Image (tube, grey):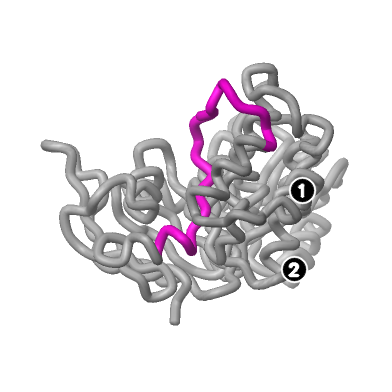
Amino acid sequence: MAALHIVDVEKRYKSLRALGGVSLSIEQGEFFGLLGPNGAGKTTLISIIAGLNRADAGSVSIHGFDVVRDYREARKRLGVVPQELVSAPFFTVRETLRMQSGYFGLKNNDEWVDEVMANLDLTNKADTNMRALSGGMKRRVLVAQALVHKPPVIVLDEPTAGVDVELRQTLWKFITRLNREGHTIVLTTHYLEEAQALCNRIAMLKAGKVVALDSTSALIKRISGSQLTLRLKGTLPDALKPLVSHPDDLLMGNKYTLRVNEYSDVEPILATLRQSGAVIEDMQLQQADLEDVFIQIMESEK
C-alpha cells in the first residue's frame, strides 16, 4: 500500500487552473521531492493532501485512507510543516506542543515532546513564550508541531526558506533519521541542492501538471550530460564548435563550455586540441546537477 496515493487531482480557482490532473504514488519510506516554479501548484496540492482544501476532481489517500471520506484517520497519519510562520502567541513552546498533542488525543506525550525539542535544539526555549522567539526558532516549533504525533507521512513545504545554516543542518539530521526509521518524507524546496542530496525520487510540476517523474539519479543522467569548461591559448578547432553549449562563447574568445555525455568523450576532445596546436590554460569537468535538469525541463515545457 502506498504511503500517499494521488489520482487525477484537479483544482480551479475561477479561470485559473491550479492543478490539471496530477497523479502520483509515493511509497512508504521514500524521501520524495516535489519541485516546481512559483505558481506550479505545489502548495495547492499540499493543501488538498492536508484536507485544508478540496479537489474539484480526483482523489488523495494516505495509507489507504481517503482525505475526504476518512479524514480523521488520514490526518492522524500526516504531519505538515507549512511555509507560513503561524504560532499561538499566548503559549510557551512546551505548551504549544502539548496542545498540538491534544489535538490527536495524546495525553502522555511529554517524553516524545522532549525528544523532538532536543533534536531541534528547542530545549532551552521550552518555557519561552512564542512571541519572544526569532523567526528561525518559530520555524523549528512548526517542525516540532508537525512531528509531535509521530506521523508516518511528513510533508515539508519550503521548511528552510529564509533560515540559517544551523537550522538547516539540525532539521535535516533529524528528518533523515526519521526517514531511516521508516517515515515517508515529501519535500518542496527551491534549494535544489537540498533536494538532490536528500530525495530518492522527484516529481516536477509546471502549470499544475507533472512534467517529470523519476529517480534523482536517473533525471540527472537522462536529461543533461556533463560540461567541460576550457580556457585556451588559441582558438577552438572547428571540429569542436558543434559541442559548444553557449554560442556566445565563440564570440567572446578563449573560454568555452562543451557538452560531453560520458567521461570517455573527453579524450577525443583533448586529442583534437593537441592536433590543432591549441594550448589548454585551464580545464574543469563538471557533472550536471539537479538545477541544470530543472532549468532544461522548465524551458522545454513552455
Say which amino acid is labelled 1: Asp
Compared to 129, does 267 lie above or below? below
Along the line of sight, the residue nearer the viewer: 194 or 285: 194
Q: Where is residue 200 in the image (x, y as percent from the top left)?
A: 61, 67
Q: Residue at x 33, y 61 (%)?
A: 71
The residue lying furthest to the front in this view is: 107
What numbered label is drawn on residue 114?
A: 1
Q: What's the distance in space between the residues labelled 2 and 1, CA to CA?
A: 50 Å
Return the residue at label 2: 263
Q: Position of residue 235 (x, y in %)?
A: 72, 41
Mark 2 surroundings: few (<14), some (14-19) or many (≥20) residues within 10 A: few
Q: Give the number of the mark in front: 2 or 1.
A: 1
Q: Residue at x 61, y 60 (%)?
A: 150
What numbered label is drawn on residue 180?
A: none
- Pick the quarter of the image with the C terminus: top left
Of labels 2 and 1, earlier in sequence is: 1
Q: Is residue 91 on the magenta stretch? A: yes
Quarter assignment of residue 73:
bottom left
Decide if residue 221 is in sight here.
no
Say which amino acid is labelled 2: Tyr
The residue lying furthest to the top in this view is: 132
Q: Where is residue 201 in the image (x, y as percent from the top left)?
A: 55, 66
**Helix or strand or loop: what does disc 2 sit on?**
helix
> Bounds of the magenta span?
74-94
Along the line of sight, the residue nearer the viewer: 41 or 67: 67
Asked if the residues shown at circle 2 and circle 1 are in contact, with their CB atoms under 8 angstroms apart, the answer is no
